[in-house]
Image (tube, rainbow, N blue to C red):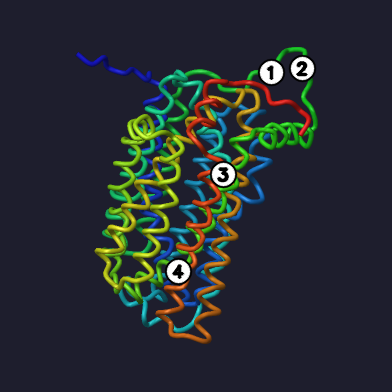
Amino acid sequence: MRERIRFGANYWKLFTASLISNTGDGMGLIAYPWLASAVTRNPLLIGLVSLANRLPWLVFSLPAGVITDRVDRRVTMVVCDTLRAGLTVVVALVVLAARGSLPGVDQLDSVHTTRPAIYAVLLIATLLLGMAEVLRDNCGQTIMPSLVDTSLLERANGRMWSAELVANTFVGPVVGSFLLSITFALPFLFDAGSFAVAAGLVFLIAGQFRAPRAESEQRQPWQRELKEGVRWLRGHSLLWPMAIILGFLNAIGMMTAATFVLFGQEVLGTSARTFAFLTTGGAIGGIVGSLAAPRVSQAIGAGPSLALTMVGGAVGAAALALTSSWPVAWLAFGIEAGLGSMWNVITVSLRQAIIPDHLLGRVNSVYRFLAWGMMPIGSLVGGLVVATADTFTSREMALRLPYVLAVVGNLILLAFGTRRLTTARIDAARAAGKVEVPAAV
């Protein structure tokens, strides 16, 4: 009889908190872009909303890593989720106050002018929510090795990722689209509630979760501590190229996502509910990919498993560049999400297993600075590509162009990555464990 794996009560509190908050985030996935497209039809302005959400990964990731290694990570997560709840309430109240000037949820083609006041609130709130998310997520990843044994990290992360995907890309958007059909403000109110509940659950996790520090060790200036994290990652022959490759993969993804709400409305002809249903393809693929990641990695090796992510990105982007059918888009999202989830489970677990705990917050933040900091750049590029192409070609061709560029980008990264992210190098790094990388680089 197969032995039951026990992760512990603290893990399940974190798991449940993530499940609930990601359900709220899933509502936001439909509510925020739909609200943006209700106040402007300008692809560049819509791209700027996406940029504002991801810009903190570029400008705040590194300080967030130093903060993570200096504070109690559990308490910081509680504070961040509480702040996110408050900010989302503000957005909901603004939307409620402006409900008379907003078009119907499925009447967005009546939008001819930008509503600057609502747009400004949306832009600022999105930026602040992104900053809280950076710190909260960095703490969430660095707290995991304190809750789960190293040998169980891949399974614990796999379960967490699959549950988050169900909530974020299946349950949340479907519920959000239903609430959106009632009134624009409802998804934001429910999203705020999810953050509040998540904060309460994380608060109930037992223990203190500060990075270990010798009693005789004096706290260094934050710039010096940050350099220590940069030096460690820069000196690691596997994690450094892995972070760079992921950065470009994320930039490509955000280049296409920045104006996807317009692509969905104008090319695929989706309503709010159909647009939300598109995310279920990603949910199903993501669940399969998250749960299958350990088995696939064991069967074909971690290197080929990571290469499949770039193959899936190219195939999915090619399908979207050519189709006007939302079911085809649904299938493409499933392929991309499934293979992308395998990347996340394998690489996050690897980082948690090999980065020394006293450096985990800083190194993780530098890694995510490279990997996620490219997202706002991708968002800006996506908006600019569509806005520029819109001046010399048809609107439809302009909205398809980012997907054509995404195919090319994924194939270039595939050629670059397969020589650097090999199974042998990944296995060697995992076997070495939490070792210190020499300071000289």
Image point (51%, 31%), residue name: 426
Viewport quadrant of the C terminus? top right
Query: Residue 435 lies in what quarter of the image?
Result: top right
How much space separates mark 4 and mark 1, taking CA atoms? 49 Å
Q: Which of the two labelled residues, at mark 4 and mark 1, occupies the earlier sequence position? A: 1
Specify whether residue 74 is in view.
no
Which residue position is annotated with label 1? 213
Q: Please tell me how many numbered marks the rendered image carries.
A: 4
- What amino acid is found at the position of numbered circle 4 in the picture? Val
Q: Secondary structure at mark 2?
A: loop
Question: What's the residue at 59%, 35% (across, down)?
Answer: 238
Q: What amino acid is at disc 2?
A: Glu
Which of the two discs, 3 and 4, labels the residue nearer the N terminus?
A: 3
Label 3 environment density (alpha carbons within 10 Å; few <14, some 14–19, many ≥20): many
Contact (Cβ within 8 Å) of mark 2 with mark 1: yes
Q: Point out the tag, 3 or 2, that comes first from the N-terminus.
A: 3
Question: Which residue is disc 3 drawn over?
Answer: 134
Residue drawn at the location 78% of the way across and 30% of the way down: 440
Considering only vertical position in the picture, is 94 above or below 155?
Answer: below
On the image, numbered disc 2 is attached to which residue?
217
Decide which of 84, 278 is in the foreground and name it.
Answer: 278
Q: Is residue 373 left or right of residue 257?
A: right
Separation of marks 3 and 4 at Cα, in angstroms: 30 Å
C-alpha gap between disc 2 and disc 1: 7 Å
Tell me which numbered mark, 4 or 2, is placed earlier along the sequence. Answer: 2
Q: Is residue 214 above or below residue 270?
A: above
**Which SS class for mark 4?**
helix
Q: Which mark is residue 404?
A: 4
CA separation in Å, label 4 and label 2: 53 Å
Do we see residue 347 in this rendering? yes
Q: Earlier in the sequence, mark 1 or mark 3?
A: 3
CA gap, disc 3 and disc 2? 27 Å
